[in-house]
Amino acid sequence: MDSNLSIFATGGIALVIIVLVILFFTFIPVGLWITAFFAGVKIKISTLIGMRLRRVAPSRIVNPMIKATKAGLNLHIDELEAHYLAGGNVNSVVDALIAAQRANIPLEFERAAAIDLAGRNVLEAVQVSVNPKVIETPQIAAVSKDGIEVVAKARVTVRANIERLVGGAGEETIIARVGEGIVTTVGSADSHKNVLENPDSISKTVLDKGLDSGTAFEILSIDIADVDIGRNIGARLQMDQAEADKRIAEAKAEERRAMAVAKEQEMRAEVQSKKAKVVEAEAEVPLALAAALKDGKMGVMDYYNMKNILADTEMRSSISKITDDDKKHK
């Protein structure tokens, strides 16, 4: 019985020891400490434990530190950990510092960390500073003074400016400024032929404007890759103006016609009104004659003489109409 208890106690102690050893090697990166030690990076076990407690992956700090030490950079483990806790990419910053050192570019850790935290790829910036890259603009349309559209495409060779990476404008600003310069240069040309004959005049004029001011790049050259002739904007504008003038003239003519029609209708209404008054007056003549005969102001012979005069007048009118019709037939 005692022997069984002894075996059980021994097995329990051994199990506890194994669990403690596993937890020790899991929580404390002994293997990473050994790697750092033989790589010449002096770091304490307590420092690695502190990283674990601060929820920092030790490998994210120690491995870049080993790389920096082997490259001859004088960095401190606390700087790398602080940059990691700030949300930076420690490995990218160390790679950028090594690349800058190899290219003999002055770059401090603080500036590299600031560039990284600003959201820029610091390693790519160093690489572009060493090996300039080409930014190709889209097709830019501009109109010369003779009204011909010129479509140009440019290639801008730029080099990263480490000093202006923090707070400097990006590639979009370079493209916009180059496009503005092309439009201004072509627009000031007297003829599109001048632009076609000397496309390098565009690049020279644009380059002299200092378009890289306030940007994260330094423009080395601007080359016109392609120049094409577009639409005849001047002729199109003249056609549009002529069409607009035509519509205005048609509208004015329609207005005058409507006014003439209204005037004619007004005159017809006036004539109808006068005819109505004449008919009304003629209707009152018999009444007036009857009243005159009744009152003795007019005699019977006077009435008959008036009738004869009217009949004679009607006869003369009929004869004149017949004569006019004969003349027309002849």
Image (spheres, rainbow, N blue to C red):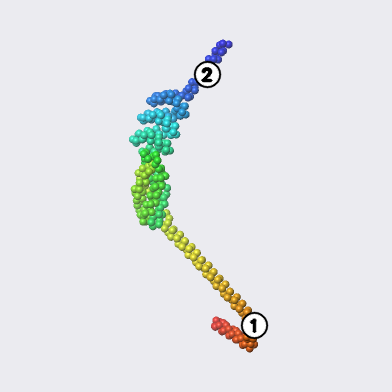
Q: Residue at x 43, y 60 (%)?
A: 238
Residue linked to disc 2: 15
139 vs 46: above or below: below
Q: Amino acid at mark 1?
A: Ala
Residue linked to disc 1: 291
Q: Residue at x 66, y 84 (%)?
A: 294
For numbered disc 2, what is the local secondary structure?
Answer: helix
Q: Which label sits in the foreground, 2 or 1?
A: 1
Q: Residue lying farthest right?
A: 294
Q: Amino acid at mark 2?
A: Leu
Across and down, in percent, residue 192 comes to 38, 55
Q: Residue at x 38, y 45 (%)?
A: 156
- Local packing at callout 2 (Cα closer than 10 Å; few below 14, some 14-19, many 20+) is few
Left or right? Give the position of 263 relative to 168.
right
Across and down, in percent, residue 166 comes to 39, 39
Residue 136: tell me if it is visible. no
149 vs 293: above or below: above
Q: Residue lying farthest bottom?
A: 301
- Local packing at callout 1 (Cα closer than 10 Å; few below 14, some 14-19, many 20+) is few
Residue at mark 2 to residue at mark 1: CA–CA distance: 152 Å
Q: Residue lying farthest top?
A: 2
Q: Considering depth in this image, is 252 or 37 the residue closer to the camera?
A: 252
233 vs 70: above or below: below
